[in-house]
Amino acid sequence: MSNNCFVCGKNNSDGMKVEFVLEDKKAYSELILDRRFEGWKGIVHGGILATLLDEVMAKACIAAGYEAVTTNIETKFKKQVEVNEQIYLEGKVVKKRKKLLYTEATIKINDKIHVKANARFWIKSKL
């Protein structure tokens, strides 16, 4: 983890500065994405959403007690996410196998899934 992380780093002047809650193999956050993160007019860029999902899954790995890096990620966009909407972002570790953690994450608006992802993380070390 770095204080210069684009998503959560407090020292990155261009970063998002998202704050996460970590608990028992899970991480979550609530936030609003403004027009700086727009792709199509009024819609949050898909790359930003995938970045947030990757980060919340990485934080879930930390909540599970591991420092780990993404080996692969699959993202499914079910509904668009409009700018200036409050989103709920959640990730969790669902399985550990040897040196890999398997994770899932969602972006919800009003309890409806708009984007979901799953990923594998390679364990660098135990925290």
Image (cartoon, rainbow, N blue to C red):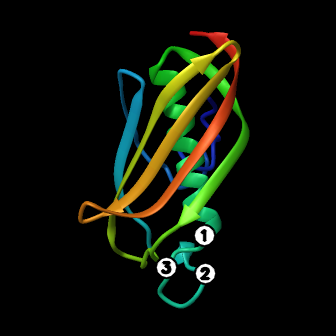
- Please tell me whether residue 87 is drawn above or below residue 125 in the rendered image: below
- Work out which quarter of the rendered image holds the C terminus and state it: top right
Measure the alpha-carbon separation of dots 2 and 3: 9 Å
Please say if 39 is above or below 23: below
User: Residue drawn 65% across and 65% down?
Assistant: 47
Figure check: 21 above or below 78: above
| Picture quadrant where residue 55 is located | top right
Q: Secondary structure at mark 1?
A: helix
Cα distance, mark 1 to mark 3?
13 Å
Q: Residue at x 62, y 20 (%)?
A: 67
Which of discs 1 and 2 lies nearer the camera? The answer is 1
Which quadrant, please, contains the N terminus? Answer: top right
Image point (24%, 65%), residue name? 110
Query: Which residue is identified by label 1?
Result: 46
Decide which of tag 1 and tag 3 comes sooner along the chain. 3
Disc 1 versus disc 2: distance between alpha carbons?
7 Å
Q: Which residue has dot 2 on it?
A: 39
Q: Is the residue marked by circle 2 packed among few (<14), some (14-19), or many (20+) residues within 10 Å?
A: some
Select label 1 or label 3 by which is in front: 1
Please name the amino acid that badge 2 sits on: Gly
User: Which image quadrant is residue 40 in?
Assistant: bottom right
- Furthest-left residue in this view: 110
- For badge 1, the amino acid type reads Gly
Of the image marks 1 and 2, the number of the one nearer the N terminus = 2
In percent of width and height, residue 16 lies at: 52, 55
